Amino acid sequence: MAEPSHPRPLPAEHPLTTGATASSSLVQAYRGVRSATTPVWFMRQAGRSLPEYRALRADHKSMLDTCLDPALASEITLQPVRRHSVDAGIFFSDIVIPLRLAGVDVEIAAGTGPVFDRAVRTAADVDALVGGGSLRDDDDALEPVREAVRRTVAQLGATPLIGFAGAPFTLAAYLVEGRPSRDHLAARRLMHTDPDAWARLMAWCADVTGAFLRAQLLAGASAGQLFDSWAGSLSRADYVQHVAPASARALSWARGLAAGDGTTVPLVHFGLGTASFLDAMKDAAADVIGVDYRLPLDEASRILGGTVPLQGNIDPALLAAPWPVLEAHTRDVLRRGRSAPAHVVNLGHGVPPDTDPDVLTRLVALVHEAGAE
Ligand code: 1CP
């Protein structure tokens, strides 16, 4: 798959250009440089674990409409930063937002996740999707996203905002099934029954999700993360042949965005259960690898040759454990993280909605204190 190249300097007012976030512990760690304290943020830190989030969502606006309301999306992004003093905000949005903006009929069903009006099962379905529209990072449709990012960054000051997007395979896993599924069988079938249609679908997903990520970065996000949450259902061979080229193509939209001093926006690549092809995820043009809770960080670092900054990987299940258990686990994660050039503490997957938010606040304090020892 052709990997387009589209560099463009970051705008003069971008926080990496002005220097506002360039020396933050997060951006430094993503560039492989350790600071006095180890940075920490949590996947799904915004959302249902926070009473202030539940209060804002009580107006019953749909999830995707909330994401596309700049004032709401910005406020929800800022809530966990204020409450927990984490070292980054993650933009409140969803991986299916670019699909919606490209004209796909998708909703988030409460308690389920993304649900589509029609599934993309055949070559004809793929052609209808691809022919039905796309998305470019300068499209008007992305203005609510850009506006939300601008508002958020203005409030965050020296704290970086992380932009994100879904990787093409994880998007396709939803599109082909039409809804969440356990093993993504329909997508993996299409990959093998019609590899050409699969490649067209993946290229379309790469460009649409790449536009979404690029728009957030140009509007002020200081780092980008590609979530390939469901890639763990793939063999290494299938990942390398049928998926990695599209992930590289998605990341190419975000790669090379440079501040005046030549430094570029760091890019993180995360998947669940992807230990057998972590190196291929790195090779898909990522600077940092996000590690799930199954793979100890020192093993991840060994697989990656000890040269790649890592993010992770506190087991979300332990957030409900007695504090001494969670504390010991967190110290172990920090110790194993020392095997990488730099480490950003995170969970190995998202914050469970029933998590006590005070536990997250206490965890941030622990990571900051431990890092200074
Ligand atoms: O009404 C609600 O509150 C719905 C829950 C919810 C939330 C809070 C969904 C539906 N999406 C989001 C926001 C969201 N999604 C964020 C920003 C919040 C933050 O991190 O603080 C992010 C980064 C995502 C990314 C996302 N969406 C991923 C990748 C990360 C991961 O968790 O693996 C995936 C797979 C999705 C799809 C999705 N959206 C929503 C749900 C419940 C799901 C998963 C469904 C499934 O199990 O397949």
Image (cartoon, rainbow, N blue to C red):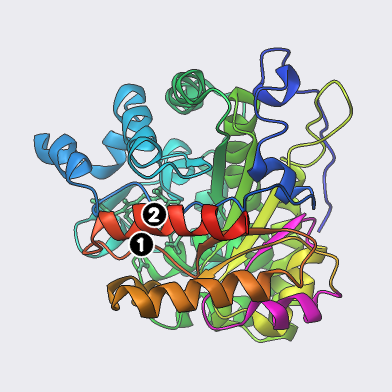
* Residue 344 shown left or right of residue 172 in the figure: right
Crowd class of label 2 (few under 14; some 14 to 19; many from 20; radius 10 Å): some
Q: Nearer the viewer, residue 219 or 64?
A: 219
For ligand 1, tell me if the residue under mark 1 lies within 8 Å: yes
First in residue order: circle 1 vs circle 2:
2
Local secondary structure at mark 1 = loop
Residue 351 disc label: 1
- Answer above or below: position of 353 versus 164: below
Q: Amino acid at mark 1?
A: Val
Decide: few, some or many residues near mark 1? Use Cα within 10 Å; few <14, some 14-19, many ≥20: many
Judge whether 147 appears above or below 33 on screen: above
Expressed as whole percent of the image width and height from the top left, the position of residue 154 reads: 50, 18
Determine if the C-beta at disc 2 is less than 8 A from ligand 1: yes
Rendered-image quadrant of the N terminus:
bottom right
Query: How far across and how far down the image is residue 340, in percent?
Result: 77, 67
Describe the element under mark 2 as helix, strand or loop.
Answer: loop
Q: Position of residue 175 (x, y in %)?
A: 44, 62
Contact, mark 1 vs mark 2 (Cβ under 8 Å): yes
Residue tagged 2: 44
Asked whether, in this view, residue 224 is left or right of residue 102, the answer is right
Q: To which quarter of the image does residue 49 belong?
A: bottom left
Q: Residue at x 72, y 50 (%)?
A: 30
Question: Relative to 204, is 315 on the left or the right?
Answer: left
25 versus 114 height, above or below: above
Q: Amino acid at mark 2?
A: Arg
Dividing the picture into quadrants, the one containing residue 208 is top right
Residue at figure coordinates x 57%, y 48% from the top left: 130
Magenta-tinted stretch = 284-305
